[in-house]
Amino acid sequence: MRFIHTADLHIDQPFSGIESDKAEIQNLLKTSNQDVLSEIVDRCLELKVDFLLIVGDTFHQAQSSIHTQKAIMTQFERLQQEDIKVVLSFGNHDYYTENRYWFEWPDNVILFKKEEVQTKTIQLKNGESVSISGFSYENQWINQSMVPFYPRRATDTTYHIGFYHGDNSKNYAPFTPGELPGSYDYWALGHIHKSEVISTNPVVVYAGTPQGHTKKENQTKGVLLVDVKSAGTTYEWLEVSNIKWHKKEVSISEALDKKELLSSLEEALFIPKNKYSLNIIEADLVTTAETTRLILKEKEEIVIYLQEQLLKQSGNRLWLKDLVLTQSTSDKLIMGFETTLIDDLGRKYKTEDFFKKTVSDLTEQTAIAKYLSWEKEDIAERVNESSQLIKDKMIFKNEADQ
């Protein structure tokens, strides 16, 4: 038995934080979600699978557009022409309601519509059979575990697989993977967008979303091609996305002039083997106080320049989403307020009553109180020293703007 396992396509979800006036990029963002589904169907056809299993949240929202619905039905019809089944459940985003769909589902689509565990059987072309157990959401939340309702492994079919859309939080059919029946041949999980193999005996896998839509979704692996035989279950990841999110850390510790800095950033951010149609980069620059001050003065223009250069060098395949500045741990801290705040606090602490109130925890310790005594001049000196120490270790808003 061979099938492809996917989940969480969120096919009508927009991409977060990508703003470009390039027509090529705008068109890619509009068509990418449907292109990913088309690629999944292409793989099903190419690899001659018995069925495609989609574990919830095919749509990003319960009320999807007519255009999106039609696009999905068209892809499922391609599979129908080759007698390939689609097994589909509904998750917390696209929870099932009968009257929301404008088109009839193709005959090859096996829907799980109920918020209860059901088992359905597929007869395979080679004479074998498989029982598939799972449930759908009929509401946005399911507050109970569905694990107790799964049946024992079927004895009247060759194989038995289960699917589950949820996690260990209270609103999404709370469970832990270790609770799932271990006698099943495969457990297909959905809801968590990070691709992750939870167990290999039995095989329990979160497919993750095949196409990341936000910067947090940079650990996706695609879809799973699963082969189940009497000897056991094997699987492999198939990449299907055409937009990839990258988290890149760049470290620049030496002092550079403006020209050298731009050149170093361009070189560090460039991805030479960009096999995806669009690579979105979230860059974290760890650098010195002086370089930080230099960038802060013209950060917006620097980001725009780097965006243009990376697009040009990559043939419109690299997009810099943001450049986040992180202070080197051995250097100064960047503060969001001005030095005048330190001065104002210093004047407050120089008042004798306020200073003594601040150090009262020390002066109330009898073992050390006799050694502690501050005259007015001592207080002023200590506060001045502390204020200067803070200023030496930080870059303030008014300094960064200079």
Image (cartoon, rainbow, N blue to C red):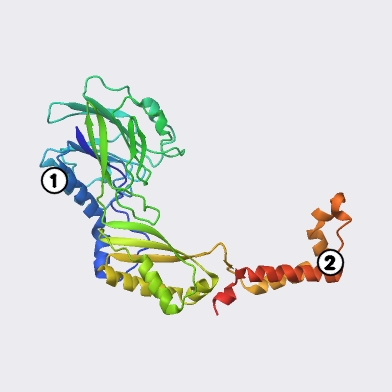
Q: Nearer the viewer, residue 250 or 300?
A: 250
Q: Would residue 100 appear left or right of 45 to someone viewing this image?
A: right
Q: Which residue is mark 1?
A: 78
Mark nearer the N terminus (1 vs 2) = 1
Rendered position, 220 above or below 129: below
Q: Would residue 96 appear left or right of 398 to someone viewing this image?
A: left
| Crowd around label 1: few <14 · some 14–19 · many ≥20 (10 Å) | some
Rendered position, 54 above or below 64: above
For the residue labelled by badge 1, is the local secondary structure a helix, a strand or a loop? helix
How many numbered tags mark residues here?
Answer: 2
Q: Which numbered disc, 1 or 2, marks the residue closer to the eye? A: 2
Counting from the top left corner in percent of width and height, residue 235 is at 26, 38
Cβ atoms under marks 1 and 2 closer than 8 Å:
no
Counting from the top left corner in percent of width and height, residue 389 is at 68, 68
Counting from the top left corner in percent of width and height, residue 334 is at 57, 68
Which residue lies most toward the top here?
Answer: 155
Quadrant assignment, res 116: top left
Q: Residue at x 74, y 70 (%)?
A: 385
Q: Tell me, yes or no, if residue 334 can be seen here.
A: no
Q: Nearer the viewer, residue 117 or 203?
A: 203
Q: Residue at x 32, y 22 (%)?
A: 152
Q: Tell me, yes or no, if residue 42 can be seen here.
A: yes
Amino acid found under the numbered disc labelled 1:
Arg
Q: Would residue 207 appear left or right of 296 to someone viewing this image?
A: left
Question: If the image is split into quadrants, where does the N terminus sit?
Answer: top left
Q: Would residue 141 appear left or right of 238 to someone viewing this image?
A: right
Amino acid found under the numbered disc labelled 2:
Glu
Rendered position, 14 above or below 53: below
Q: Which residue is mark 2?
A: 352
Q: Nearer the viewer, residue 93 or 334?
A: 334
Q: Residue at x 36, y 62 (%)?
A: 281
